[in-house]
Image (tube, rainbow, N blue to C red):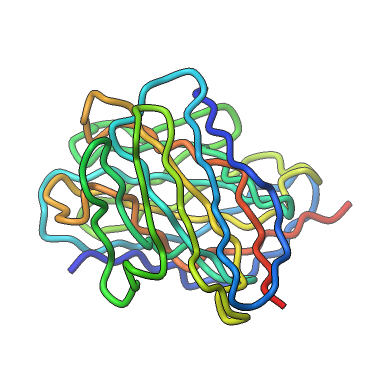
Amino acid sequence: AQKITQTQPGMFVQEKEAVTLDCTYDTSDPSYGLFWYKQPSSGEMIFLIYQGSYDQQNATEGRYSLNFQKARKSANLVISASQLGDSAMYFCAMRVSGNQAGTALIFGKGTTLSVSS
Amino acid sequence: GAVVSQHPSWVICKSGTSVKIECRSLDFQATTMFWYRQFPKQSLMLMATSNEGSKATYEQGVEKDKFLINHASLTLSTLTVTSAHPEDSSFYICSARGTSGSITDTQYFGPGTRLTVL
Protein backbone atom coordinates (compact mmCIF):
# COMPACT_ATOMS: atom_id res chain seq x y z
CA ALA A 1 0.00 0.00 0.00
CA GLN A 2 1.13 3.53 -0.69
CA LYS A 3 1.73 5.83 2.23
CA ILE A 4 3.12 9.27 2.96
CA THR A 5 4.47 10.08 6.41
CA GLN A 6 5.12 13.54 7.79
CA THR A 7 6.34 13.23 11.36
CA GLN A 8 6.54 16.91 12.26
CA PRO A 9 3.15 18.29 13.31
CA GLY A 10 4.64 21.74 13.73
CA MET A 11 7.85 23.56 12.95
CA PHE A 12 9.05 26.98 14.05
CA VAL A 13 11.63 29.09 12.26
CA GLN A 14 12.81 32.68 12.28
CA GLU A 15 12.70 34.91 9.26
CA LYS A 16 15.61 34.51 6.81
CA GLU A 17 16.54 31.11 8.21
CA ALA A 18 16.26 27.87 6.26
CA VAL A 19 13.91 25.09 7.35
CA THR A 20 13.52 21.45 6.35
CA LEU A 21 10.15 19.73 6.38
CA ASP A 22 10.39 15.96 6.48
CA CYS A 23 8.54 13.51 4.29
CA THR A 24 8.98 9.79 3.85
CA TYR A 25 7.00 7.61 1.52
CA ASP A 26 6.29 3.99 0.91
CA THR A 27 5.46 2.37 -2.40
CA SER A 28 6.48 -0.71 -4.31
CA ASP A 29 5.81 0.95 -7.64
CA PRO A 30 9.06 1.99 -9.37
CA SER A 31 7.35 4.90 -11.11
CA TYR A 32 5.99 7.62 -8.88
CA GLY A 33 5.88 11.35 -8.42
CA LEU A 34 6.30 13.35 -5.26
CA PHE A 35 4.68 16.73 -4.73
CA TRP A 36 4.69 19.42 -2.10
CA TYR A 37 1.76 21.76 -1.55
CA LYS A 38 1.31 24.77 0.71
CA GLN A 39 -2.04 25.47 2.35
CA PRO A 40 -2.38 28.88 4.00
CA SER A 41 -5.21 29.61 6.40
CA SER A 42 -7.45 30.55 3.46
CA GLY A 43 -7.56 26.86 2.55
CA GLU A 44 -6.30 27.00 -1.02
CA MET A 45 -3.77 24.38 -2.04
CA ILE A 46 -0.72 25.89 -3.72
CA PHE A 47 1.59 23.63 -5.71
CA LEU A 48 5.23 24.17 -4.80
CA ILE A 49 7.50 21.55 -6.31
CA TYR A 50 7.59 18.15 -8.02
CA GLN A 51 10.12 15.28 -8.05
CA GLY A 52 9.84 12.23 -10.27
CA SER A 53 11.18 8.88 -9.16
CA TYR A 54 13.50 8.69 -12.17
CA ASP A 55 14.77 12.25 -11.90
CA GLN A 56 18.52 12.30 -11.41
CA GLN A 57 18.70 15.73 -9.88
CA ASN A 58 16.89 17.22 -6.93
CA ALA A 59 14.10 19.58 -7.94
CA THR A 60 14.38 23.28 -7.20
CA GLU A 61 11.87 26.09 -7.57
CA GLY A 62 13.05 29.45 -6.33
CA ARG A 63 13.42 29.24 -2.55
CA TYR A 64 12.08 25.69 -2.51
CA SER A 65 14.22 22.64 -3.06
CA LEU A 66 13.49 19.00 -2.61
CA ASN A 67 16.09 16.78 -0.95
CA PHE A 68 15.28 13.49 -2.66
CA GLN A 69 16.94 10.42 -1.17
CA LYS A 70 15.51 7.48 -3.06
CA ALA A 71 17.20 4.73 -1.07
CA ARG A 72 15.82 6.18 2.15
CA LYS A 73 12.46 6.90 0.52
CA SER A 74 12.54 10.46 1.70
CA ALA A 75 11.60 13.68 -0.06
CA ASN A 76 12.21 16.53 2.33
CA LEU A 77 11.27 20.08 1.42
CA VAL A 78 13.84 22.76 2.11
CA ILE A 79 12.72 26.37 2.28
CA SER A 80 15.58 28.83 2.21
CA ALA A 81 15.41 32.36 3.58
CA SER A 82 12.03 31.91 5.29
CA GLN A 83 9.51 34.72 5.05
CA LEU A 84 6.52 35.54 7.23
CA GLY A 85 4.28 34.62 4.32
CA ASP A 86 5.62 31.08 4.43
CA SER A 87 3.59 30.41 7.57
CA ALA A 88 1.11 27.75 6.48
CA MET A 89 0.44 24.05 6.49
CA TYR A 90 2.64 22.03 4.14
CA PHE A 91 1.63 18.72 2.62
CA CYS A 92 3.76 16.11 0.97
CA ALA A 93 1.92 14.01 -1.59
CA MET A 94 2.59 11.10 -3.90
CA ARG A 95 1.16 9.71 -7.07
CA VAL A 96 2.01 6.24 -8.38
CA SER A 97 1.50 5.07 -11.91
CA GLY A 98 -0.29 1.90 -10.88
CA ASN A 99 -2.64 3.50 -8.38
CA GLN A 100 -6.03 1.90 -8.85
CA ALA A 101 -7.66 4.99 -7.42
CA GLY A 102 -7.10 6.68 -10.74
CA THR A 103 -3.75 8.22 -9.96
CA ALA A 104 -5.03 10.65 -7.37
CA LEU A 105 -2.55 12.24 -5.04
CA ILE A 106 -2.18 10.66 -1.61
CA PHE A 107 -1.35 13.15 1.11
CA GLY A 108 0.61 13.06 4.33
CA LYS A 109 -0.82 14.54 7.53
CA GLY A 110 0.91 17.84 6.99
CA THR A 111 3.30 20.06 8.90
CA THR A 112 2.34 23.47 10.22
CA LEU A 113 5.16 25.94 9.70
CA SER A 114 5.28 29.11 11.75
CA VAL A 115 7.71 31.84 10.75
CA SER A 116 8.49 34.54 13.31
CA SER A 117 10.17 37.91 12.90
CA GLY B 1 -0.78 27.80 -13.78
CA ALA B 2 -4.14 26.26 -14.45
CA VAL B 3 -7.17 27.60 -12.62
CA VAL B 4 -9.82 25.56 -10.89
CA SER B 5 -12.85 27.31 -9.49
CA GLN B 6 -15.27 26.02 -6.90
CA HIS B 7 -18.69 27.28 -6.00
CA PRO B 8 -19.94 28.08 -3.46
CA SER B 9 -16.97 28.95 -1.27
CA TRP B 10 -19.03 28.41 1.84
CA VAL B 11 -22.51 27.17 2.63
CA ILE B 12 -24.61 26.77 5.72
CA CYS B 13 -27.60 24.49 5.53
CA LYS B 14 -30.12 22.76 7.73
CA SER B 15 -29.86 19.11 8.55
CA GLY B 16 -31.65 16.98 5.99
CA THR B 17 -31.16 19.27 3.02
CA SER B 18 -28.97 18.61 -0.01
CA VAL B 19 -26.08 20.76 -1.09
CA LYS B 20 -24.47 20.89 -4.53
CA ILE B 21 -20.86 21.98 -4.99
CA GLU B 22 -19.51 22.81 -8.44
CA CYS B 23 -15.94 22.42 -9.59
CA ARG B 24 -14.76 23.93 -12.87
CA SER B 25 -11.47 23.87 -14.70
CA LEU B 26 -11.35 27.32 -16.27
CA ASP B 27 -8.50 27.18 -18.77
CA PHE B 28 -7.89 23.52 -19.43
CA GLN B 29 -9.83 20.36 -20.01
CA ALA B 30 -9.89 17.86 -17.18
CA THR B 31 -10.79 14.28 -17.96
CA THR B 32 -10.29 13.44 -14.31
CA MET B 33 -11.33 15.39 -11.27
CA PHE B 34 -10.92 14.41 -7.66
CA TRP B 35 -12.94 15.27 -4.59
CA TYR B 36 -11.26 15.52 -1.21
CA ARG B 37 -12.53 16.19 2.28
CA GLN B 38 -10.56 17.89 4.97
CA PHE B 39 -11.36 18.26 8.66
CA PRO B 40 -9.70 21.10 10.65
CA LYS B 41 -5.95 20.67 11.07
CA GLN B 42 -6.05 17.35 9.26
CA SER B 43 -4.97 16.01 5.92
CA LEU B 44 -6.90 15.79 2.69
CA MET B 45 -8.75 12.53 2.35
CA LEU B 46 -9.66 11.38 -1.13
CA MET B 47 -13.38 10.74 -1.43
CA ALA B 48 -13.79 9.87 -5.07
CA THR B 49 -12.35 10.09 -8.54
CA SER B 50 -14.60 11.58 -11.18
CA ASN B 51 -14.09 10.73 -14.83
CA GLU B 52 -15.83 12.62 -17.59
CA GLY B 53 -18.71 10.65 -19.03
CA SER B 54 -18.50 7.73 -16.63
CA LYS B 55 -19.38 6.81 -13.08
CA ALA B 56 -17.23 8.07 -10.25
CA THR B 57 -14.94 5.74 -8.35
CA TYR B 58 -15.43 6.05 -4.62
CA GLU B 59 -12.87 5.35 -1.93
CA GLN B 60 -13.58 2.72 0.65
CA GLY B 61 -15.92 3.99 3.34
CA VAL B 62 -17.41 6.80 1.25
CA GLU B 63 -21.14 6.39 0.67
CA LYS B 64 -21.81 6.86 -3.03
CA ASP B 65 -25.53 7.40 -2.43
CA LYS B 66 -24.79 10.20 -0.02
CA PHE B 67 -22.07 11.92 -2.02
CA LEU B 68 -23.32 12.05 -5.59
CA ILE B 69 -20.75 12.98 -8.19
CA ASN B 70 -21.46 13.98 -11.75
CA HIS B 71 -18.75 14.82 -14.31
CA ALA B 72 -20.86 15.93 -17.23
CA SER B 73 -18.20 17.73 -19.24
CA LEU B 74 -14.45 18.15 -19.47
CA THR B 75 -14.65 21.31 -17.39
CA LEU B 76 -17.31 20.62 -14.79
CA SER B 77 -17.77 18.15 -11.96
CA THR B 78 -20.38 18.45 -9.23
CA LEU B 79 -20.57 16.94 -5.76
CA THR B 80 -23.99 16.75 -4.13
CA VAL B 81 -24.16 16.02 -0.42
CA THR B 82 -27.60 14.48 0.00
CA SER B 83 -29.55 14.69 3.25
CA ALA B 84 -26.69 16.46 4.94
CA HIS B 85 -26.11 16.00 8.66
CA PRO B 86 -23.84 17.86 11.10
CA GLU B 87 -21.15 15.20 10.76
CA ASP B 88 -20.89 16.09 7.06
CA SER B 89 -19.65 19.56 8.01
CA SER B 90 -16.20 19.81 6.53
CA PHE B 91 -13.99 21.52 3.96
CA TYR B 92 -14.52 19.98 0.52
CA ILE B 93 -11.83 20.51 -2.09
CA CYS B 94 -11.92 19.52 -5.72
CA SER B 95 -8.91 18.98 -7.89
CA ALA B 96 -8.35 18.57 -11.58
CA ARG B 97 -5.51 17.37 -13.72
CA GLY B 98 -4.86 17.72 -17.39
CA THR B 99 -5.55 15.26 -20.15
CA SER B 100 -2.03 14.02 -20.87
CA GLY B 101 -2.32 11.30 -18.28
CA SER B 102 1.35 11.62 -17.38
CA ILE B 103 2.46 10.88 -13.85
CA THR B 104 4.04 14.32 -13.86
CA ASP B 105 0.70 16.08 -14.32
CA THR B 106 0.20 18.59 -11.59
CA GLN B 107 -3.09 18.42 -9.77
CA TYR B 108 -4.61 21.87 -9.49
CA PHE B 109 -6.94 22.52 -6.62
CA GLY B 110 -10.03 24.60 -6.26
CA PRO B 111 -10.27 27.07 -3.38
CA GLY B 112 -12.50 24.72 -1.41
CA THR B 113 -16.05 24.83 -0.04
CA ARG B 114 -16.68 25.07 3.64
CA LEU B 115 -19.89 23.24 4.48
CA THR B 116 -21.62 23.75 7.81
CA VAL B 117 -24.68 21.68 8.54
CA LEU B 118 -26.80 22.93 11.44
- The quadrant where residue A5 appears: bottom left
Q: Could you say where residue B52 lies in the image, as x and y percent from the top left? A: 27, 36
Residue at 41% of width from left, 70% of height from top?
B66
Would residue A43 be found to the left or right of residue B48 on screen? right
- The quadrant where residue B86 appears: bottom right
Residue at 47% of width from left, 73% of height from top?
A7
On screen, residue A105 above or below B42: above
Would residue B10 be found to the left or right of residue A60 on screen? right
Q: Could you say where residue A33 lies in the image, as x and y percent from the top left? A: 27, 43
Which of these two is toward me, B19 or B106? Answer: B19
Which of these two is toward me, A50 or A95? Answer: A95
- Residue extending farthest to the top is B27
- Residue extending farthest to the right is A117
On screen, residue A76 above or below B99: below
Residue at 21% of width from left, 56% of height from top?
A101
Q: How many numbered marks appear?
A: 0
Q: Could you say where residue A117 lies in the image, as x and y percent from the top left? A: 89, 51
Q: Quadrant of the N terminus of chain A?
A: bottom left
Would residue B47 be found to the left or right of residue A88 on screen? left
On screen, residue B73 above or below B56: above
Which of these two is toward me, B53 or B23? Answer: B53
Would residue B95 be found to the left or right of residue A58 on screen? right
Residue at 72% of width from left, 78% of height from top?
B118
Q: Could you say where residue B14 lies in the image, as x and y percent from the top left? A: 69, 73
